[in-house]
Amino acid sequence: MQLAILLYDGVTALDAIGPYEVLQAPGLGIDVRFVAREKGMKRTDFGRLGLQADYTLDEVPRPDILLVPGTAFPQAVMGDPVVLEWIAQVHQTSKWTTSVCTGALGLGAAGVLKGLRASTHWLAHEALTQFGAIPTKERVVRDGKVMTAAGVSSGIDMALTLVAEEFGSDAAQLTQLLIEYDPHPPFDAGSPDKAPPLIVNTAREAFRKLNNNAPR
């Protein structure tokens, strides 16, 4: 089974690496490939980290699983017609088409989410409707072979869900134990429904300023 993880300049690191840590477990036997328009280093959304793409899009035309990680700057994916065409083509033959965070907007722009329930980062939920998707406030949403995860950390949950679907619950639990995924966050503020209103408003304002200053 082959997994293609899309990389591009501006990608959010944990969106890609969280699921990678789950799905690369040796016992699963998944052939993980980091792909991009061109091979080489891709800088993450704030430029402080680089991730290496070892394959071009043309070299990975029919992966069994497609993973589109998100970004603080959604136009990095939504505005690239070559990447969108590849996503659409891969989706035709994939067993699973998945996304993390705003990666769902890339799936939407490629025509994958029309009429489907989907999740993304809470700040981008309404943007899903422009692609005919049905925004859903769940951490992991499966609609047919499409599996979308909410914000950044939820990619780990999505990957474990995928392992359970493909290899069974024992394999998923073993993987979860091996990476010691047993979160106990210091604050119950991981969603806009739980965080204090002041914190939610601060996040909205930060997101607005970030995208107003995003590269065009």
Image: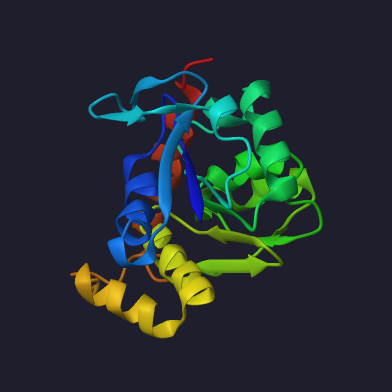
Residue 126 in the image, given as x and y percentages of width and height: 66, 50
Residue 35 in the image, given as x and y percentages of width and height: 47, 32
Q: Residue drawn at (75%, 47%), measured in percent from left and top? A: 92
Which sits in the foreground, 12 or 196? Answer: 12
Q: Quadrant of residue 159?
A: bottom left
Quick check: 190 left or right of 75? left
In the picture as drawn, the residue positioned furthest to the top comes out as 216
In the picture as drawn, the residue positioned furthest to the bottom comes out as 170
Residue 67 in the image, given as x and y percentages of width and height: 51, 48
Where's the C terminus, which quadrant?
A: top right
- Residue 190 to residue 34: above or below: below
Q: Quadrant of residue 71?
A: top left
Q: Give the number of callouts.
A: 0
Q: Residue drawn at (80%, 50%), measured in percent from left and top? A: 132
Residue 172 in the image, given as x and y percentages of width and height: 38, 76
Color style of the picture: rainbow
- Residue 188 to residue 46: above or below: below
Q: Residue drawn at (38%, 60%), measured in percent from left and top? A: 29
Q: Residue drawn at (21%, 71%), measured in percent from left and top? A: 178
| Residue 15 visible in the snapshot | yes
Which sits in the foreground, 145 or 79? Answer: 145
| Residue 192 visible in the snapshot | no
Q: Quadrant of residue 81?
A: top right
- Residue 20 to residue 188: above or below: above
